[in-house]
Image (cartoon, helix red, strand yellow):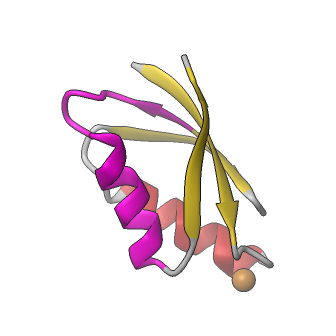
Amino acid sequence: MTKMHLDIEGMSCGHCVKAVRDALAGVEGVEVRDVSIGSADIAVDERRAPRDRILDAIADAGYQATVDSAA
Ligand SMILES: [Cu+2]
């Protein structure tokens, strides 16, 4: 699993946190570790969950995400 930190624009409240958490949880191969306003920490099986799919899931929920770090 790859630990990934995402920067996420457009989040402002607890509803946003829940929306992002739900979006990430819906991607197969992603384990949600922590979501707060403006960022998320996840663990990713990159063979099952390509980055584009993760970022697209967040975009579909209405937010703009970028990968800040991955290790
Ligand atoms: Cu909100």
Residue at horizontal 71%, vertical 52%? 39
Q: Is residue 43 visible?
A: yes
Q: Quadrant of the C terminus?
A: top right
Residue 36 can be seen in this image: no
Which residue is rendered at x = 27% and y = 40% of the image? 50
Left or right side of 4 for 56: left
Task: Name the quarter where the N terminus is drawn.
Answer: top left
Q: Quadrant of residue 10?
A: bottom right
Q: Is residue 66 left or right of residue 39?
A: left
The relative height of residue 5 versus residue 8 in the rendered view (above or below) is above
> In which image quadrant can residue 24 be found?
bottom left
Task: Say left or right for 49 vs 6.
Answer: left
Residue 3, position as x, y percentages in the image: 53, 24
Q: Nearer the viewer, residue 43 or 70?
A: 70
Asked if residue 9 lies in the magenta stretch, the reply is no
The image quarter in which residue 31 lies: top left
Q: How many marks?
A: 0
Residue sitting nearer the eye, 57 or 36: 57
Question: Which residue appears at 67% of the width and 68% of the height?
Answer: 17
Q: Position of residue 52 (x, y in %)?
A: 32, 50
- Please identify the residue farthest to the left as the structure is shown: 48
Depth check: give the residue in front, 69 or 11: 69
- In the rendered view, tell whether residue 20 sits above or below residue 36: below
Residue 57 x %, y % = 37, 65
Q: Residue at 51% x, 81% y: name it.
A: 62
Question: Which quarter of the rendered image does ligand 1 occupy?
Answer: bottom right
Is residue 45 one of those drawn in magenta? yes
Q: What range of the chain is rendered magenta? A: 42-61
